[in-house]
Amino acid sequence: MLENFAIKISTRNRQKKYVFFLEQMQPHKDTKILDVGFTDDDVYPGVNFLETNYPYKKNITGLGMEEGSTFKKNFPEVKVVVYDGSYFPFADNEFDIAWSNAVIEHTGSRDKQLLFLSELIRTSKSIFITTPNRWFPIEVHTRLPFFHYLPKKYFDRILWIIGKGWAAGAYMNLLSINDMKKMLKELNIKNYTIKKNRKFFSTMDFFLIVKKE
């Protein structure tokens, strides 16, 4: 029952993100969109929300590290590109918009997160990404309260002890808003907007918008 409740919240949250994306980015029928981090898992309606709802699917390119056989079947109009998780195989500013929903926290170490963010910015004229807030009381992947406030090595140890080792290690490195701002400063990105998405009187996740033009 708790899992069903969490899925409902997640699905509504993704709907909210999508509406905000449309309002802020204003894509049209010719807009070229890069979706970085699609998933081949379609077990509940919240996944691949962009492809499910966006009307001009033929203008979306999905970039991921898996072949995406189920994804291709569900969204045959979307072009799928597989890469090794490092540099994106695209030219500078090849896309009008890069969309990445709750992916950067799964890319590995801080250096890999920085590379991921820089590649989003390099290959697209504007970007729209989301990520869970590290300081939200409930860790949204494991549904555990407060343990993620600990240093990562201790949080990982707890995850293994309670049978949630799948979420340890490189799988998840949560970011705060300050962490994101520090990476943007390192990349010399000054023109950006961060929008807090509040839930239960706290920031559950946040949206980053960067527009280069």
Image (tube, grey):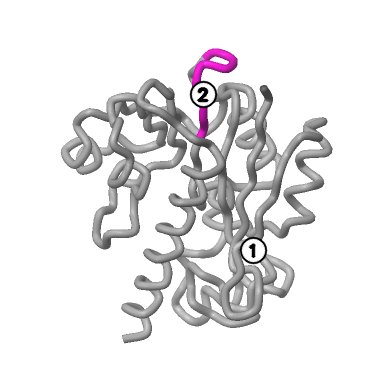
Q: Amino acid at mark 1?
A: Asn
Residue 16, compared with residue 9, is above or below; it is above
Extreme-top residue of the structure: 91
Viewer-proximal residue, 192 or 10?
Answer: 192
Viewer-proximal residue, 34 or 54?
Answer: 54
Residue in the picture at 54% in, 64% down: 168
Instruction: Give the numbered dot on residue 67.
Output: none
Please provide percent x and percent y for residue 49. Answer: 35, 50
Residue in the picture at 35% in, 72% down: 8
Whether residue 147 can be seen here: no
Q: Residues within 10 Å of mark 2 (few under 14, many from 20)?
A: some
Residue 25, compared with residue 13, is above or below; it is above
Residue 16, compared with residue 146, is above or below; it is above
The residue pinned by badge 1 equals 133
Residue in the picture at 82% in, 36% down: 186
Q: Amino acid at mark 2?
A: Asp
Quadrant assignment for the C terminus: top right
Whether residue 132 can be seen here: yes
Please provide percent x and percent y for residue 158. Answer: 59, 78
Viewer-proximal residue, 95 or 120?
Answer: 95
The magenta segment is 91-98
Which element is circle 1 on? loop
The count of marks equals 2
**Is residue 103 within the magenta segment?**
no
Residue in the picture at 63% in, 41% down: 209
Please provide percent x and percent y for residue 26. Answer: 49, 35
The residue pinned by badge 2 equals 96
- Dot 2 or dot 1: first in sequence order is 2
